[in-house]
Protein backbone atom coordinates (compact mmCIF):
# COMPACT_ATOMS: atom_id res chain seq x y z
CA UNK A 1 0.00 0.00 0.00
CA UNK A 2 1.39 3.47 -0.86
CA UNK A 3 2.33 5.61 2.09
CA UNK A 4 0.01 8.48 3.08
CA UNK A 5 1.15 12.08 2.71
CA UNK A 6 2.07 13.05 6.29
CA UNK A 7 1.27 12.15 9.87
CA UNK A 8 -2.18 13.72 9.47
CA UNK A 9 -3.13 10.81 7.24
CA UNK A 10 -0.90 8.09 8.71
CA UNK A 11 -3.45 6.95 11.25
CA UNK A 12 -6.16 6.87 8.57
CA UNK A 13 -4.28 4.62 6.12
CA UNK A 14 -5.98 1.53 7.53
CA UNK A 15 -9.36 2.78 6.35
CA UNK A 16 -8.31 2.45 2.71
CA UNK A 17 -8.88 -1.29 3.09
CA UNK A 18 -12.53 -0.56 3.91
CA UNK A 19 -13.11 0.44 0.27
CA UNK A 20 -12.74 -2.52 -2.12
CA UNK A 21 -12.52 -0.27 -5.20
CA UNK A 22 -8.87 0.35 -4.30
CA UNK A 23 -8.08 -3.33 -4.83
CA UNK A 24 -8.33 -2.80 -8.56
CA UNK A 25 -8.35 0.96 -9.14
CA UNK A 26 -7.17 4.34 -7.94
CA UNK A 27 -10.30 6.22 -6.92
CA UNK A 28 -10.15 10.02 -7.28
CA UNK A 29 -13.85 10.69 -7.81
CA UNK A 30 -15.35 11.13 -4.34
CA UNK A 31 -16.94 14.40 -5.42
CA UNK A 32 -19.19 12.45 -7.79
CA UNK A 33 -19.84 9.43 -5.59
CA UNK A 34 -18.16 8.26 -2.41
CA UNK A 35 -16.85 4.71 -2.81
CA UNK A 36 -18.76 1.80 -1.28
CA UNK A 37 -17.34 0.66 2.04
CA UNK A 38 -17.48 -2.85 3.44
CA UNK A 39 -19.47 -1.43 6.34
CA UNK A 40 -22.16 0.05 4.14
CA UNK A 41 -22.46 -3.18 2.18
CA UNK A 42 -22.85 -5.12 5.44
CA UNK A 43 -25.45 -2.68 6.77
CA UNK A 44 -27.55 -2.89 3.61
CA UNK A 45 -27.33 -6.65 3.92
CA UNK A 46 -28.59 -6.38 7.48
CA UNK A 47 -31.58 -4.34 6.27
CA UNK A 48 -32.40 -6.98 3.67
CA UNK A 49 -32.20 -9.70 6.31
CA UNK A 50 -34.58 -7.73 8.55
CA UNK A 51 -36.97 -7.15 5.67
CA UNK A 52 -36.90 -10.86 4.85
CA UNK A 53 -37.35 -12.03 8.43
CA UNK A 54 -39.81 -9.49 9.76
CA UNK A 55 -41.42 -7.53 6.95
CA UNK A 56 -43.35 -4.43 8.01
CA UNK A 57 -43.10 -5.27 11.72
CA UNK A 58 -39.48 -4.05 11.62
CA UNK A 59 -40.70 -0.47 11.17
CA UNK A 60 -41.74 0.14 14.72
CA UNK A 61 -38.81 -1.02 16.81
CA UNK A 62 -35.99 -1.04 14.26
CA UNK A 63 -36.41 1.16 11.19
CA UNK A 64 -38.10 4.20 12.74
CA UNK A 65 -35.38 4.36 15.44
CA UNK A 66 -32.81 4.13 12.62
CA UNK A 67 -34.28 7.28 11.10
CA UNK A 68 -33.88 9.04 14.43
CA UNK A 69 -30.27 7.90 14.69
CA UNK A 70 -29.58 9.22 11.22
CA UNK A 71 -31.14 12.63 11.93
CA UNK A 72 -28.97 12.87 15.05
CA UNK A 73 -25.85 11.78 13.16
CA UNK A 74 -26.40 14.35 10.41
CA UNK A 75 -26.95 17.04 13.05
CA UNK A 76 -23.62 16.11 14.66
CA UNK A 77 -21.75 16.49 11.36
CA UNK A 78 -22.97 20.06 10.80
CA UNK A 79 -23.16 21.34 14.38
CA UNK A 80 -26.96 21.41 14.47
CA UNK A 81 -29.36 20.98 17.36
CA UNK A 82 -31.91 18.23 17.87
CA UNK A 83 -35.08 18.43 15.84
CA UNK A 84 -33.58 20.53 13.02
CA UNK A 85 -33.02 17.75 10.47
CA UNK A 86 -35.48 16.53 7.85
CA UNK A 87 -34.65 13.49 5.73
CA UNK A 88 -35.04 13.58 1.94
CA UNK A 89 -34.19 11.30 -0.98
CA UNK A 90 -32.25 14.06 -2.78
CA UNK A 91 -31.21 17.71 -2.67
CA UNK A 92 -33.86 18.41 -5.31
CA UNK A 93 -36.51 17.16 -2.90
CA UNK A 94 -35.10 19.33 -0.09
CA UNK A 95 -35.05 22.34 -2.42
CA UNK A 96 -38.69 21.75 -3.29
CA UNK A 97 -39.68 21.69 0.38
CA UNK A 98 -38.02 25.07 0.87
CA UNK A 99 -39.28 26.59 -2.38
CA UNK A 100 -42.85 25.59 -1.59
CA UNK A 101 -42.64 27.20 1.85
CA UNK A 102 -41.92 30.75 0.70
CA UNK A 103 -44.36 33.60 0.03
CA UNK A 104 -43.27 35.27 -3.20
CA UNK A 105 -45.97 37.94 -3.30
CA UNK A 106 -43.91 40.70 -1.67
CA UNK A 107 -40.49 39.19 -2.28
CA UNK A 108 -40.60 37.41 -5.66
CA UNK A 109 -36.84 37.24 -6.26
CA UNK A 110 -34.41 34.37 -5.66
CA UNK A 111 -30.68 35.00 -6.06
CA UNK A 112 -28.17 32.32 -7.05
CA UNK A 113 -24.84 32.24 -8.92
CA UNK A 114 -23.41 31.04 -12.21
CA UNK A 115 -21.18 28.53 -10.39
CA UNK A 116 -23.91 26.72 -8.49
CA UNK A 117 -25.05 23.24 -9.43
CA UNK A 118 -27.88 23.62 -11.99
CA UNK A 119 -30.42 21.94 -9.70
CA UNK A 120 -30.35 25.02 -7.48
CA UNK A 121 -31.40 27.39 -10.26
CA UNK A 122 -33.76 24.90 -11.90
CA UNK A 123 -35.97 24.83 -8.80
CA UNK A 124 -36.87 28.50 -9.25
CA UNK A 125 -36.49 28.84 -13.01
CA UNK A 126 -39.38 26.39 -13.16
CA UNK A 127 -41.48 28.91 -11.24
CA UNK A 128 -40.77 31.96 -13.41
CA UNK A 129 -44.17 31.59 -15.07
CA UNK A 130 -45.73 31.93 -11.61
CA UNK A 131 -44.12 35.32 -11.04
CA UNK A 132 -40.86 34.23 -9.42
CA UNK A 133 -37.77 36.12 -10.55
CA UNK A 134 -34.37 34.45 -10.67
CA UNK A 135 -31.21 36.55 -10.57
CA UNK A 136 -28.01 34.69 -11.39
CA UNK A 137 -24.88 36.46 -10.19
CA UNK A 138 -21.94 35.79 -12.55
CA UNK A 139 -18.47 34.79 -11.40
CA UNK A 140 -15.88 37.42 -12.41
CA UNK A 141 -13.05 34.88 -12.60
CA UNK A 142 -14.86 31.60 -13.31
CA UNK A 143 -13.70 30.26 -9.96
CA UNK A 144 -15.34 32.21 -7.13
CA UNK A 145 -18.16 34.65 -6.48
CA UNK A 146 -17.20 37.41 -4.03
CA UNK A 147 -19.67 37.89 -1.19
CA UNK A 148 -19.86 41.58 -2.12
CA UNK A 149 -21.36 40.73 -5.50
CA UNK A 150 -24.04 38.59 -3.90
CA UNK A 151 -24.73 41.30 -1.32
CA UNK A 152 -25.20 43.85 -4.11
CA UNK A 153 -27.75 41.58 -5.78
CA UNK A 154 -29.87 41.23 -2.63
CA UNK A 155 -32.65 43.72 -2.04
CA UNK A 156 -35.99 44.19 -0.37
CA UNK A 157 -37.60 42.05 -3.09
CA UNK A 158 -35.31 39.07 -2.44
CA UNK A 159 -36.97 36.13 -0.68
CA UNK A 160 -33.99 33.79 -0.71
CA UNK A 161 -30.34 33.45 -1.64
CA UNK A 162 -29.68 29.87 -2.76
CA UNK A 163 -26.04 29.00 -3.29
CA UNK A 164 -23.32 26.46 -2.54
CA UNK A 165 -20.98 25.91 0.35
CA UNK A 166 -18.43 24.52 -2.12
CA UNK A 167 -18.71 25.13 -5.87
CA UNK A 168 -18.89 21.83 -7.71
CA UNK A 169 -16.47 22.60 -10.54
CA UNK A 170 -13.83 24.81 -8.93
CA UNK A 171 -13.98 23.55 -5.35
CA UNK A 172 -13.96 27.11 -4.00
CA UNK A 173 -15.36 27.40 -0.47
CA UNK A 174 -17.79 30.22 0.25
CA UNK A 175 -17.76 32.19 3.49
CA UNK A 176 -21.10 31.17 4.97
CA UNK A 177 -20.90 33.58 7.90
CA UNK A 178 -20.35 36.54 5.59
CA UNK A 179 -23.19 35.36 3.35
CA UNK A 180 -25.49 35.03 6.36
CA UNK A 181 -24.71 38.56 7.52
CA UNK A 182 -25.46 39.95 4.05
CA UNK A 183 -28.78 38.11 3.97
CA UNK A 184 -29.76 39.12 7.48
CA UNK A 185 -29.17 42.78 6.69
CA UNK A 186 -31.64 42.51 3.83
CA UNK A 187 -34.16 40.36 5.70
CA UNK A 188 -33.49 37.54 3.24
CA UNK A 189 -33.26 33.82 3.96
CA UNK A 190 -30.16 31.81 2.97
CA UNK A 191 -30.28 28.27 1.56
CA UNK A 192 -26.90 26.52 1.31
CA UNK A 193 -26.35 23.51 -0.95
CA UNK A 194 -23.73 21.67 1.07
CA UNK A 195 -23.56 18.49 -0.99
CA UNK A 196 -20.02 19.23 -2.14
CA UNK A 197 -18.88 20.41 1.29
CA UNK A 198 -20.29 18.44 4.22
CA UNK A 199 -17.77 15.82 5.28
CA UNK A 200 -14.69 17.12 3.51
CA UNK A 201 -14.77 20.64 5.02
CA UNK A 202 -15.90 21.79 8.49
CA UNK A 203 -19.54 22.83 8.83
CA UNK A 204 -21.06 24.68 11.79
CA UNK A 205 -24.54 25.86 10.90
CA UNK A 206 -25.11 27.40 14.32
CA UNK A 207 -21.96 29.52 14.13
CA UNK A 208 -22.47 30.54 10.50
CA UNK A 209 -26.12 31.50 10.99
CA UNK A 210 -27.48 29.94 7.80
CA UNK A 211 -31.23 29.38 7.52
CA UNK A 212 -31.13 26.15 5.51
CA UNK A 213 -28.34 23.68 4.80
CA UNK A 214 -28.77 20.56 2.68
CA UNK A 215 -26.38 17.69 1.99
CA UNK A 216 -26.43 13.91 1.94
CA UNK A 217 -24.77 10.57 1.46
CA UNK A 218 -23.86 10.64 -2.22
CA UNK A 219 -20.40 12.16 -1.90
CA UNK A 220 -18.19 12.90 1.11
CA UNK A 221 -20.51 11.37 3.73
CA UNK A 222 -20.08 7.92 2.18
CA UNK A 223 -23.71 6.88 2.17
CA UNK A 224 -24.48 6.45 -1.51
CA UNK A 225 -27.54 7.72 -3.35
CA UNK A 226 -31.11 7.99 -2.15
CA UNK A 227 -30.53 9.79 1.15
CA UNK A 228 -30.11 13.49 1.88
CA UNK A 229 -31.06 15.93 4.60
CA UNK A 230 -32.33 19.45 5.11
CA UNK A 231 -31.32 21.51 8.15
CA UNK A 232 -33.64 24.38 9.06
CA UNK A 233 -32.76 27.07 11.58
CA UNK A 234 -35.62 27.14 14.12
CA UNK A 235 -34.94 30.79 14.95
CA UNK A 236 -35.63 31.94 11.39
CA UNK A 237 -37.75 29.27 9.67
CA UNK A 238 -40.25 28.05 12.27
CA UNK A 239 -42.99 30.17 10.67
CA UNK A 240 -42.64 28.36 7.34
CA UNK A 241 -44.78 25.43 6.25
CA UNK A 242 -44.26 23.54 2.98
CA UNK A 243 -47.20 23.41 0.62
CA UNK A 244 -45.82 20.07 -0.55
CA UNK A 245 -46.87 18.45 2.71
CA UNK A 246 -46.00 14.80 3.13
CA UNK A 247 -46.91 11.93 5.42
CA UNK A 248 -43.68 12.00 7.46
CA UNK A 249 -44.03 15.75 7.94
CA UNK A 250 -47.31 15.27 9.80
CA UNK A 251 -47.27 15.68 13.58
CA UNK A 252 -48.93 12.27 14.08
CA UNK A 253 -48.44 10.25 10.88
CA UNK A 254 -49.53 6.96 12.42
CA UNK A 255 -52.89 8.33 13.50
CA UNK A 256 -53.81 8.26 9.79
CA UNK A 257 -56.21 11.20 10.12
CA UNK A 258 -56.80 13.16 6.91
CA UNK A 259 -57.97 16.31 8.67
CA UNK A 260 -56.74 18.54 10.06
CA UNK A 261 -53.27 18.80 8.52
CA UNK A 262 -51.01 19.45 11.48
CA UNK A 263 -47.32 19.59 10.63
CA UNK A 264 -44.56 18.76 13.07
CA UNK A 265 -43.37 21.71 15.13
CA UNK A 266 -39.68 21.11 14.39
CA UNK A 267 -37.58 20.68 11.25
CA UNK A 268 -39.19 17.35 10.42
CA UNK A 269 -42.22 19.23 9.03
CA UNK A 270 -40.13 19.63 5.86
CA UNK A 271 -40.07 15.83 5.32
CA UNK A 272 -42.16 14.16 2.64
CA UNK A 273 -42.80 10.43 2.23
CA UNK A 274 -41.38 7.15 3.46
CA UNK A 275 -37.54 7.18 3.36
CA UNK A 276 -35.49 4.46 1.70
CA UNK A 277 -34.37 2.35 4.64
CA UNK A 278 -31.63 0.66 2.61
CA UNK A 279 -30.15 4.11 1.93
CA UNK A 280 -30.54 5.06 5.58
CA UNK A 281 -28.58 1.97 6.62
CA UNK A 282 -25.82 2.61 4.07
CA UNK A 283 -25.52 6.17 5.34
CA UNK A 284 -25.45 5.19 8.99
CA UNK A 285 -22.48 2.95 8.23
CA UNK A 286 -20.68 5.71 6.33
CA UNK A 287 -21.17 8.20 9.15
CA UNK A 288 -20.07 5.61 11.70
CA UNK A 289 -16.83 5.14 9.78
CA UNK A 290 -16.21 8.90 9.62
CA UNK A 291 -16.98 9.28 13.32
CA UNK A 292 -14.56 6.48 14.19
CA UNK A 293 -11.83 7.95 11.99
CA UNK A 294 -12.46 11.38 13.47
CA UNK A 295 -14.03 13.95 11.19
CA UNK A 296 -11.44 16.56 12.16
CA UNK A 297 -8.60 14.21 11.24
CA UNK A 298 -10.35 13.26 8.00
CA UNK A 299 -10.62 16.90 7.05
CA UNK A 300 -7.01 17.67 8.03
CA UNK A 301 -5.69 14.78 5.93
CA UNK A 302 -7.89 15.83 3.03
CA UNK A 303 -6.57 19.41 3.15
CA UNK A 304 -3.01 18.11 3.00
CA UNK A 305 -3.85 15.87 0.06
CA UNK A 306 -5.49 18.80 -1.73
CA UNK A 307 -2.37 20.93 -1.27
CA UNK A 308 -0.19 18.13 -2.60
CA UNK A 309 -2.42 17.58 -5.65
CA UNK A 310 -2.53 21.29 -6.52
CA UNK A 311 1.23 21.74 -6.11
CA UNK A 312 2.03 18.67 -8.20
CA UNK A 313 -0.35 19.80 -10.96
CA UNK A 314 1.15 23.29 -10.99
CA UNK A 315 4.68 21.88 -11.14
CA UNK A 316 3.69 19.92 -14.25
CA UNK A 317 2.23 23.04 -15.91
CA UNK A 318 -1.35 21.71 -15.74
CA UNK A 319 -2.73 25.01 -14.34
CA UNK A 320 -5.39 23.66 -11.97
CA UNK A 321 -8.43 25.91 -11.62
CA UNK A 322 -8.66 26.50 -7.88
CA UNK A 323 -9.27 29.45 -5.59
CA UNK A 324 -6.30 31.79 -5.27
CA UNK A 325 -6.25 31.49 -1.48
CA UNK A 326 -5.48 28.06 -0.04
CA UNK A 327 -8.05 28.59 2.73
CA UNK A 328 -10.79 28.75 0.08
CA UNK A 329 -9.79 25.46 -1.56
CA UNK A 330 -11.53 22.15 -1.05
CA UNK A 331 -10.69 18.67 -2.30
CA UNK A 332 -12.25 19.40 -5.70
CA UNK A 333 -9.39 20.11 -8.07
CA UNK A 334 -10.24 20.81 -11.70
CA UNK A 335 -7.75 20.90 -14.54
CA UNK A 336 -8.60 22.67 -17.82
CA UNK A 337 -8.34 20.29 -20.78
CA UNK A 338 -9.28 20.43 -24.45
CA UNK A 339 -10.97 17.02 -24.39
CA UNK A 340 -11.72 16.07 -20.77
CA UNK A 341 -13.87 13.07 -21.68
CA UNK A 342 -10.99 11.57 -23.62
CA UNK A 343 -8.71 12.23 -20.65
CA UNK A 344 -11.11 10.49 -18.29
CA UNK A 345 -11.15 7.50 -20.63
CA UNK A 346 -7.33 7.48 -20.67
CA UNK A 347 -7.28 7.64 -16.87
CA UNK A 348 -9.75 4.73 -16.72
CA UNK A 349 -7.53 2.67 -19.01
CA UNK A 350 -4.72 3.29 -16.51
CA UNK A 351 -6.96 2.11 -13.67
CA UNK A 352 -7.74 5.59 -12.34
CA UNK A 353 -11.33 6.71 -11.77
CA UNK A 354 -11.94 10.46 -12.23
CA UNK A 355 -14.64 12.61 -13.79
CA UNK A 356 -15.13 15.29 -16.45
CA UNK A 357 -17.01 18.56 -16.50
CA UNK A 358 -17.21 20.93 -19.48
CA UNK A 359 -13.62 21.84 -20.32
CA UNK A 360 -12.29 20.25 -17.13
CA UNK A 361 -11.00 17.03 -15.65
CA UNK A 362 -12.05 16.84 -12.01
CA UNK A 363 -9.96 15.02 -9.41
CA UNK A 364 -11.29 14.77 -5.86
CA UNK A 365 -9.09 13.06 -3.24
CA UNK A 366 -10.33 12.13 0.21
CA UNK A 367 -8.65 10.84 3.37
CA UNK A 368 -8.22 7.33 1.95
CA UNK A 369 -6.13 8.59 -0.97
CA UNK A 370 -2.33 8.93 -1.11
CA UNK A 371 0.20 11.13 -2.88
CA UNK A 372 1.04 8.16 -5.10
CA UNK A 373 -2.56 8.27 -6.36
CA UNK A 374 -1.97 11.89 -7.38
CA UNK A 375 1.32 11.10 -9.09
CA UNK A 376 -0.26 8.33 -11.16
CA UNK A 377 -3.20 10.46 -12.31
CA UNK A 378 -1.14 13.53 -13.17
CA UNK A 379 1.36 11.40 -15.07
CA UNK A 380 -1.45 10.36 -17.42
CA UNK A 381 -2.67 13.94 -17.86
CA UNK A 382 0.80 15.41 -18.31
CA UNK A 383 1.87 12.94 -20.96
CA UNK A 384 -1.43 11.93 -22.50
Image (spheres, helix red, strand yellow):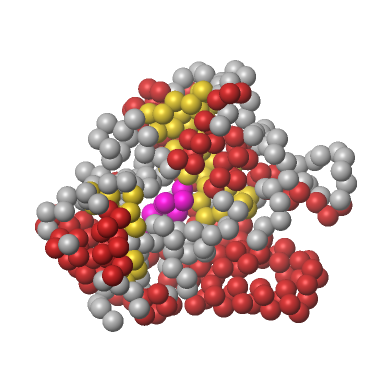
Position of 295 with respect to 245 (left or right) is: left
Whether residue 348 is in magenta: the answer is: no
- 19 or 209: nearer the eye? 19
- In the depicted structure, whether residue 304 falls above or below residue 235: below
Q: Is residue 265 visible from the viewing direction of this image?
A: no
Residue at image x 52%, y 45%?
213
Whether residue 198 is in magenta: the answer is: yes
Residue at image x 30%, y 63%?
345
- In the depicted structure, whether residue 122 falls above or below residue 313: above
Residue 105 is drawn in which quadrant?
top right
Position of 73 with respect to 335 (left or right) is: right
**Quarter occupied by the N terminus:** bottom left
Residue at image x 26%, y 64%?
346
Residue 326 position in % (x across, y down): 24, 49
Residue 81 position in % (x across, y down): 58, 50
- 45 or 270: nearer the eye? 45
Residue at image x 56%, y 68%?
282
Magenta extent: 194-201
Amino acid sequence: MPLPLTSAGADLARYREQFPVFRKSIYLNSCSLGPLSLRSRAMVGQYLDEWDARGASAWYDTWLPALERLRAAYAEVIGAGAGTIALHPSISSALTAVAESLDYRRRPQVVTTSLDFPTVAYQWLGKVGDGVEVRIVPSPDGTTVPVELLAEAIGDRTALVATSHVFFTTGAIQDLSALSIACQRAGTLLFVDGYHGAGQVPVDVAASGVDFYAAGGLKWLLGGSGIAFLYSNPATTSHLAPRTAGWFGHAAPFDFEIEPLVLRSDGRRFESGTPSVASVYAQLAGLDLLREAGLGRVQAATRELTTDLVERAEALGLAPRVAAQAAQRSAIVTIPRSDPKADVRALAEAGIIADARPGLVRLSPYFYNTVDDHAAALEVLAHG
